[in-house]
Amino acid sequence: LTTDANRNEIERGIEIVFPPDISSGTYNFEDKKVCATFWKIWQVETHIRFETYSADTGSITLSFDHDQELYKGSFQFKSAGAEGKELEVNGGMFSIKGRDSISL
């Protein structure tokens, strides 16, 4: 959570979606087997603003250890975005220990 020049709070996140049968390996976002989206949401006066940037190019490397319930990944992508706004994400990483019925 950060604030902009007008003191509006901005929340940001990255969502990564892949099929349940995917295995460890490297995947290109262009192939559409894995999808990633950077998003941000904030309020300006009484309006909620929401922007998304879907991965157009880039890749993700996944490593799954189902026995240890350890799920890791690294990623980078570029998005053309809406209205000509471009976004580049470099050096993204995640590590998840454990599993529930919603994640993974």
Image (cartoon, rainbow, N blue to C red):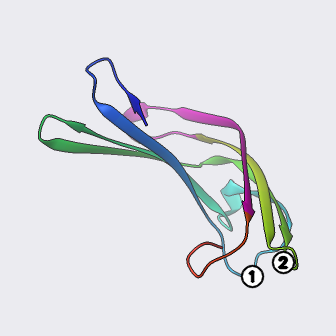
72 relative to 83, above or below: below
- The amino acid type found where label 2 is placed reads His
Question: Which quarter of the rendered picture does the N terminus lie within?
Answer: top left
Q: Secondary structure at mark 1?
A: loop
Judging by the rendered image, the residue that carries numbered circle 1 is: 21
Alpha carbon distance from label 2 to label 1: 12 Å
Q: Which mark is residue 66?
A: 2
Instruction: Please check the rendered image and state whether residue 23 is part of the magenta-colored stretch, yes or no.
Output: no
6 relative to 64, above or below: above
Instruction: Name the residue located 63 percent from the left edge and 37 percent from the top edge.
Output: 89
- The amino acid type found where label 1 is placed reads Asp
Tell me residue 30's x, y (percent): 67, 55
Nearer to us in this view, 76 or 30: 76
Question: Which quarter of the rendered picture does the C terminus lie within?
Answer: bottom right
Left or right of 13 on screen, residue 74: right
Tell me residue 97's x, y (percent): 75, 65
Residue 99 image-quadrant placement? bottom right
Q: Residues within 10 Å of mark 2 (few under 14, many from 20)?
A: few
Q: Secondary structure at mark 2?
A: loop
Q: Which residues are magenta?
A: 79-96
Tell me residue 92's x, y (percent): 70, 42
